[in-house]
Amino acid sequence: MTGDCKIWKWELDITDEQDIVAPLATKFLDVQWQYDTIAIWGMFDCRIEHDLVPRKLIICGTGNRISIADVWKHALYVGTVQESNRRLVWHVFDMGSDLERTREYRGMAKVDILMAGNRTNE
């Protein structure tokens, strides 16, 4: 059986902001506490060869301050994670890639962004 999508997993550091390298137009599916760290899963269309791009993620603990301008303007909520042996709760937001945040691409559909960043063999 051949599928059209792949799902990858990344382990995250508990820090305010970080970049992970992911295929362009990755859709994050879930975030959970796994093996003493935060793990995030994302899906992408594997029928198209994607550029790997840095994506900015924001992790904010309950009660901590967060840049509201950044979150309201660019971020998508991914999920909330509670540590298994502690009382700490983390909220994860996807800021997307630099390409997705540029003025040129604002308002474009994900499929248009995907095609714009797609590699060609021509």
Image (cartoon, rainbow, N blue to C red):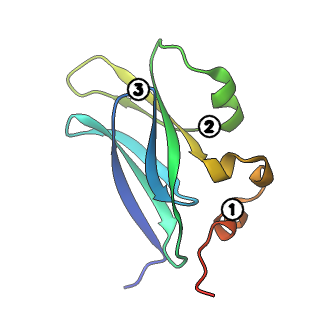
Q: Position of residue 120 (x, y in %)?
A: 61, 80
The crowd level at tag 3 (other Cα within 10 Å; few <14, some 14-19, many 20+) is many
Q: Is residue 16 left or right of residue 101?
A: left
Residue pictured at 40% horizontal, 84% vertical: 2
Q: Which numbered disc, 1 or 3, marks the residue that appears first in the sequence?
A: 3
Q: Residue furthest bottom?
A: 122
Judge depth for marks 2 and 3 and give the one in front.
Answer: 2
- Which residue in the structure is indicated by mark 2? 75
Is disc 2 placed on a helix, strand or loop? loop
- Which residue in the structure is indicated by mark 1? 113
Check disc 3 and give the amino acid type.
Trp
CA distance separating discs 2 and 3: 15 Å
- Regarding residue 107, the answer to whether it shows in the image is no
- Regarding residue 30, the answer to whether it shows in the image is yes
Judge depth for marks 1 and 3 and give the one in front.
Answer: 1
The crowd level at tag 2 (other Cα within 10 Å; few <14, some 14-19, many 20+) is some
Image quarter where the N terminus lies is: bottom left
Q: Which numbered disc, 1 or 2, marks the residue that appears first in the sequence?
A: 2
Q: Position of residue 74 (x, y in %)?
A: 67, 38
Q: Quadrant of residue 39?
A: top left
Q: Quadrant of residue 8?
A: bottom left
CA distance separating discs 1 and 3: 29 Å
Q: Which mark is residue 90?
A: 3
Check disc 2 and give the amino acid type.
Ala
Is disc 1 placed on a helix, strand or loop? helix
CA distance separating discs 1 and 2: 16 Å
Image quarter where the C terminus lies is: bottom right
Residue pictured at 75% horizontal, 54% vertical: 105
Q: Is residue 46 above or below residue 96?
A: below
